Amino acid sequence: MPKTKEEIAAYNKAYYIANKEKIAAKQRKWYIDNKEKALELSRAYYKDNIERYNEYREANKEKIAARMKAWGEANKEKIAAKNRAYYIANKDKIRITYKKWAEANKEKIKAYSSSEKRSEYYQKNKHNFQKYTAKRRSLKRKQIPVHLRDCPQEKQRLTQTYKLSNLLTKATGVQHHVDHMWPLADGGPHWSGNLQVIPAEENMSKHASVCEETKATIIKSLYTFDTSSPI
């Protein structure tokens, strides 16, 4: 006697549960052996079912966001390493793309960089700003090199660097940041020689780590630097 749809579905479900790992391993092997074909099939399926995908995403926004957040938290180092590798391999391409976008969106950038917009954003996110600022102050205090803590020339250099960032932002209409080449979070010093002024988008695409060669260069420069030299 032929089985009903419900019986077939129940059998398939039971088989899947009993052989989950075996099935997953087989699927992974097939994907590795047929990566290009798998991507092609995935794109074609998505294209043919885009309305279903959109409906599902709309109906499960919170569930999807929670799942993505949990995955991101569990894979922070993996994501950072991947993003950093991509940035290093595509640095010139990213800069060109950003430059083109900035040229085409000057008015938009100016509007979002206006004091009114910044104030509105700050008010909505004040607690995050305060937490981040407190953390940064703490890091900077701990990571100012001992021999530079009371150096007036060094204080002036730091001030001039931050002024330059503001001047570039106003002159170009593109938000600029003062960036620690060797990030504070990775143990870098808060020292003028470790600072660079770069577009905000480039700074945001960086991660809190740097190669050992850069660290060695900064350390060498720091301890051979003449603190009394003119600015």
Image: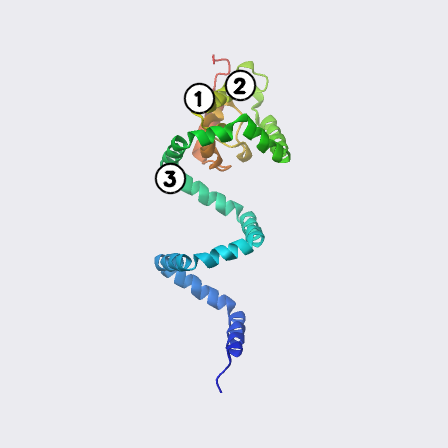
Left or right position of 85 against 18: left
Q: Is any part of residue 185 visible from this angle?
A: yes
> Marks 3 and 1, Cα distance to the nearest angstrom?
27 Å
Residue shown at 61% from the left, 35% from the top:
124
Q: Secondary structure at mark 2?
A: helix
Left or right position of 187 against 28: right
Res. 128 image quadrant: top right
Q: Secondary structure at mark 1?
A: helix
Residue shown at 54% from the left, 70% from the top:
17
Measured as percent of width and height from the top left, residue 134 is found at 63, 30
Question: Which one is nearer the viewer's eye here, 105 or 44?
Answer: 105
Q: Who comes first in sequence, dot 1 or dot 2?
A: 2
> Marks 1 and 2, Cα distance to the nearest angstrom?
18 Å
The residue carrying mark 3 is: 90
The residue carrying mark 2 is: 159
Q: Who comes first in sequence, dot 3 or dot 1?
A: 3
Relative to 194, does residue 73 appear above or below in the rendering? Answer: below
Q: Residues within 10 Å of mark 3 (few under 14, many from 20)?
A: few
- Amino acid at circle 3: Asn
Q: Is any part of residue 223 visible from this angle?
A: no
Q: Secondary structure at mark 3?
A: loop
Residue shown at 51% from the left, 45% from the top:
77
Measured as percent of width and height from the top left, residue 205 is found at 46, 37
The residue carrying mark 1 is: 171
- Amino acid at circle 2: Thr
Q: Residues within 10 Å of mark 2 (few under 14, many from 20)?
A: few
Q: Who comes first in sequence, dot 3 or dot 2?
A: 3
- Residue 80's tag is none
Question: Which one is nearer the viewer's eye here, 95 or 137?
Answer: 95
